[in-house]
Image (cartoon, grey):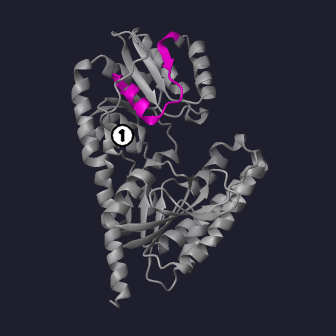
Amino acid sequence: MIKMFYSTREKYPASRVDLQDLFSKRVCRQLDIKLDWHMQNMGELVEASQVVDVTGETVFLGKNSMRQGVLKKVQNQYFAFLHDCKAWFYLRKNDYDIVQVRDKFWIALIALIAMKGRAGIFCYWMSFPYAEADLYRIQAEKDAYSFLYRVFYFIRGSLTHWLLYRVILPRADFVFVQSERMLKDVAKQGVGHHKMMAVPMGVAWERLQNLPQAKTLGLPKEAKVAVYMGTMVKVRQLDFILEAFVHVLAVENDAVLLMVGGEPDDVQRLQDIGTKLGIADSVYFTGLLDMQEAWSYVLAADICLSPFRPSPILDSTSPTKVVEYLALGKPVVVNDHPDQSRVIEESQAGVVTQYTPESFAEGMLSLFQHPEQWSTMGKLGKKYVENTRNYDVISNRVANVYQQLVQTVTTNRRGG
């Protein structure tokens, strides 16, 4: 049995599919890994503690503040720091084969020191460029922050950037990154390709099979339906879709836009924008749904939409939405984002456009006006995801890396 310590900035209970479906349900079971998680609690935990998760995994939990507002954020930062410091004792007490840190800096440094002189493997998992994001926001969004906040982000970003690229990653035995674009960006910082692997977002194939019957909200049978599924927070700038749909309706007046998901306040904001644009009668909102029900609405779509705002920071991410659409057999319109573009170009299951309302509308119209292509694209998309972005496939690649790393540990412990 392989013993692994995994520290992540995600809160307990973790809901990310790449932690649950990829890691717990697949990689750990494939390699018989005894997994100890290190997280902060999301619920009402008075004191930090060690618990046994329902999956049989041990979770070292950090304290969570019950206060509100800014004080809650400050306290949770303090509690997180203390919890990371306690990791020293967990790491020294237990003889882990693999220690893995995801998107955290201070505990990565602690782990490297705690493991000095031991045979265990240290891996770093980078799912988002947090250090770069701090430095980027004070340049691109400086008007949104006070002087003190800009100073804070500059100091934090500079420190974590130096710590990550000059201390942590050079000393890591292996580095997992979120996308091929991120791999190239990290390599430019001097980290060798030979010890990195891109692990893009995928889907748990079995979860998208045998879904409930497609739901249509009673839309007219002749309507051509475009669906967006996902969060609708303001930062996603989804007024972009509504602006694009104005151009679509000028050509296809029977087209319908279905917005699946969204918190009440976000939905209301977008409804108000739709009213101002004069397209309210052609835009429908479902509100918050569980994932299975949301997917059932996607099944009723003719085409699906995945706009992703271009940004030096977001360009290195790997969106899940487009992969879910393809797994459900739907042609997709995306804008020119590195990972999304690659998926569509390799699968031939959709259209890639520029990030302008006019260009995105042209992409939607090109699919609406050629319904004979929908079925073919849908089949190509499903096949592509099943063969390349299915977590069964991705987990095999990740598990092979760990297996090779553990073989190195075993060899070291035997003295060569």
Q: Between 183 and 31, which is closer to the camera in this rendering? A: 31
Q: Quadrant of the N terminus?
A: bottom left
Residue 52 image offset from top left, x and y in percent: 52, 62
Is 291 part of what is drawn in magenta?
A: yes
Q: Between 391 and 14, which is closer to the camera in this rendering? A: 14
* 192, above or below 179, in the image: below
User: So how many labels did they put on this image?
Assistant: 1
The amino acid marked with disc number 1 is: Val
Residue 353 seen in render? no
Query: What residue is rendered at 32% in x and 89% in y?
Result: 416
Q: Which residues are magenta?
A: 281-303
Query: What residue is rendered at 43% in x and 16% in y?
Result: 217
Farthest residue toward the bottom?
415
Residue 193 image offset from top left, x and y in percent: 37, 65
Q: Picture quarter containing residue 228?
A: top left
Residue 377 image offset from top left, x and y in percent: 25, 30
* 72, above or below 111, in the image: above
Indicate left or right for 299 with 60 as reference: left
Residue 121 image offset from top left, x and y in percent: 43, 75
Q: Picture quarter containing residue 373?
A: top left
Residue where numbered disc 1 is placed: 323
Residue 98 seen in render? yes
Is 140 part of what is drawn in magenta?
A: no
Indicate left or right for 339 with 50 as reference: left
Q: Secondary structure at mark 1?
A: helix
| Crowd tier of the residue under label 1, counting other residues whose Cα lies within 10 Å: few below 14, some 14–19, many 20 or above | many
